[in-house]
Image: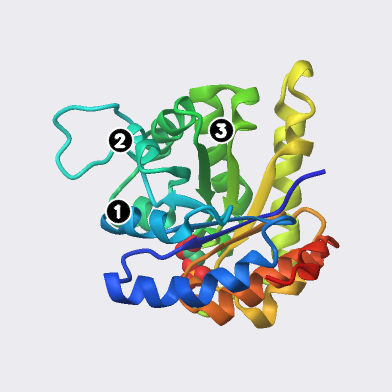
Amino acid sequence: MRKPVLIGNWKMNGSLQANQALMVRLLPRLRLYRKSVDLAVCPPLPYLFQVRDLLGYTGIALGAQNASAFVSGAYTGEVSATMLQEMGCRYVLVGHSERRTLYGESNQEVAARFRAVMNLGLTPVLCVGESLDERETEQTSSVVESQIQAVIDEVGFSALANGVVAYEPVWAIGTGRTATPEQVSVVHQNIRGFIAANAPEASQDISEGLRIIYGGSVKPSNALDLFSLADVDGGLIGGASLHAEDFGSIAGSLAKASGILEGECETH
Ligand code: PGA
């Protein structure tokens, strides 16, 4: 059985004061679900140290929003997976659509970053998804498959299992326009089917074990419908992860959709 995972992507938001205030309100809410759901937050890099301390021993993981493909060297502005590991990160997003579109990260570059994260034993969260234009011209499957194929070419099928795939249609990110459960269901099934169809005999169980999560304007009002879909194993949450009530409620929906609610019995 795939354990659901919920990751908050703070993007370039926050301040020492705002992070502290958010975490004080968020942690008691998330603690209710930490046994049934893997939970993580990805603050901007300068705040990793602060948020790591605030997370303490809650069992809620720290993540980062990107990592270099290289271990060290003359790469001004980049941060290596080794550094993120030292800071206590467990998850690292790679290939977020904002990195692909605003900073020109290609499928191959994203794949190299995936490898660097994976090599450190951290969990790369591979973000894939089509633009509105690509959806309207029926290229969704081919775009998403080529984004995944680039990673398979780089690390191999079995290594894909070390990661999480996040399907995030670009047109649904930060727009308030969520993909419908039908649209999400089709793409998630296609991703699992694509991996099953192409994996070599020895890696056939990869597709069943791989966690495929959805991101793009997930909010308390639509989370349960999305997370109830058979092939949706969690969420990557942007805007709503900056609000403790919303992120807590979304975590509750994920726990409920997964039918694992024992965490709610906790009294602390
Ligand atoms: P959103 O962002 O929830 O604000 O749409 C999702 C993401 O970019 O990961």
Residue designated by label 2: 80
Element under label 2? Answer: loop
Residue located at (39% from left, 35% from top) = 113
Name the amino acid type tagged 2.
Ser
- Disc 1 target residue: 45
Front position in the image: 43 or 145 = 43
Q: Position of residue 250 (x, y in %)?
A: 65, 72
Identified by mark 3, the residue type is Gln
Please state which of residues 78 and 110 is positioned toward the viewer in this rendering. 78
What amino acid is labelled 1 in the image?
A: Leu
Q: Nearer the viewer, residue 201 or 59?
A: 59
**Figure quadrant of residue 257:** bottom right
* Mark 2 or mark 3: whose residue is earlier in sequence: 2
Could you say whether the residue bearing mark 1 is in a helix, strand or loop? helix
Pinpoint residue 57: horizontal percent, then vertical percent. Answer: 53, 52
Circle nearer the N terminus (1, 2): 1
Q: Check disc 1: other Cα within 10 Å, few if <14, some if 14-19, many if 20+.
A: some
Which residue is at a point 34% across and 54% down the rendered structure image?
48
5, above or below 75, in the image: below
